[in-house]
Amino acid sequence: MPPRMTALKIREMKGRERIPVVTCYDYTMARLCEAAGIPLLLVGDSLGNVILGYETTVRVRLAEMLHHTLAVMRARPHALVVVDMPFLTFQVSPRKALAAAGRIVQETGADAVNSRGRAQPRGRATHGGGRIPVMGHLGLTPQSVLEFGGHPVRGRGAAGEKLLQDARELEEAGCFSLVLEKIPAPSAAESAKRCASRPSASARAPAATDRCSCSMTSWASTPRFTRGS
C-alpha cells in the first residue's frame, strides 16, 4: 500500500511532474480518484452550488464542509486531502481561523486547508501552536460574490501585478501551494515562475502552471466551466 501524499511531497513535485487535482465532495468520487491515482483532492465549498443547490458559496457552513469531507475520507484516499475554509471561518481573526482549521483536520482526518485571498490563515495556521498546511487561493474568490456582483476574470491589467505580489506574499508566508482561479494565462504563467518553490494550479490556464485543477461534478453539470472566457 503506497504511503499517503503529504504537503511536502506536493511541493517537491514542482518542476518534476504535472500534478492533477480533482475537486470532489463524496465517497464515490473519492474512490474513483483513488483508483486513478490522483495525488491531490480538494473538498471545495463549491459543493454549495453543485451538490446543495445554493446560489452562492456564502451559504456553505463549516458543518457542511465537515460532513462532505468525512464522506471523502471514508474512501481512505492516499491523496493529499485539502478542504476549503467556508465563509467567515478565516476572515474574522487568526484565532477563529485556527479553531476552524483545527476542527477540519481533527474531526475529519484531512491534511490541509484552503484559504481564499490574503486573509488568515496564511502559510500555516501557527496561532496557539497549530501546524496546519495551507493552500493559498488567488484570483476569483467566489466567497466575494456579494462584493463583486458575479464571477469576473481577475488579474487583468494593473490588477495582474497586484496578484503577482500577493502570490509572492503567500509563498513567503509558507503556503505549500497556490490555486489561481479564473485569471489570464500570462498572469498564471508569471505567478508560477515567480513562486519558484511552490506549485500552482489553474483550471483556466493549466499549461501555464504546475497542476491542472478540475471539478468533475461542475464539469459534467455546468457547460460554462469547460469554456475559456
Image (tube, rainbow, N blue to C red):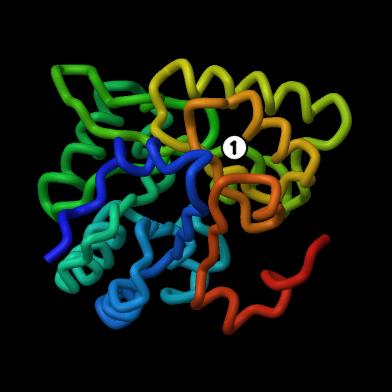
Q: Position of residue 88 (x, y in %)?
A: 40, 39
Residue 28 at what x, y percent from top left? 29, 82
The residue at which mark 1 appears reads as 138
Instruction: Tell me what residue is drawn at x 72 percent, y 43 percent.
Output: 148
Q: Residue at x 37, y 45 (%)?
A: 85
Q: Quadrant of residue 68?
A: bottom left
Residue 86 seen in the figure? yes
For mark 1, give the secondary structure.
strand
Q: Residues within 10 Å of mark 1 (few under 14, many from 20)?
A: many
Can residue 144 be seen in the rendering of this structure? no
Outermost front residue: 16
Closest to the observer: 124 or 85?
A: 124
Q: Is residue 166 left or right of residue 122?
A: right
Foreground pick, 146 / 154 = 154
Q: Nearer the viewer, residue 52 or 38?
A: 38
Is residue 119 shown left or right of residue 166?
left
The amino acid sitting under disc 1 is Leu
Q: Residue at x 85, y 24 (%)?
A: 158
Decide if residue 25 is on the left or right side of residue 71: right
Q: Considering only vertical position in the picture, is 224 above or below 96?
A: below
| Quadrant of the rendered image containing residue 169 | top right
Residue 225 at x, y percent in the picture: 67, 70
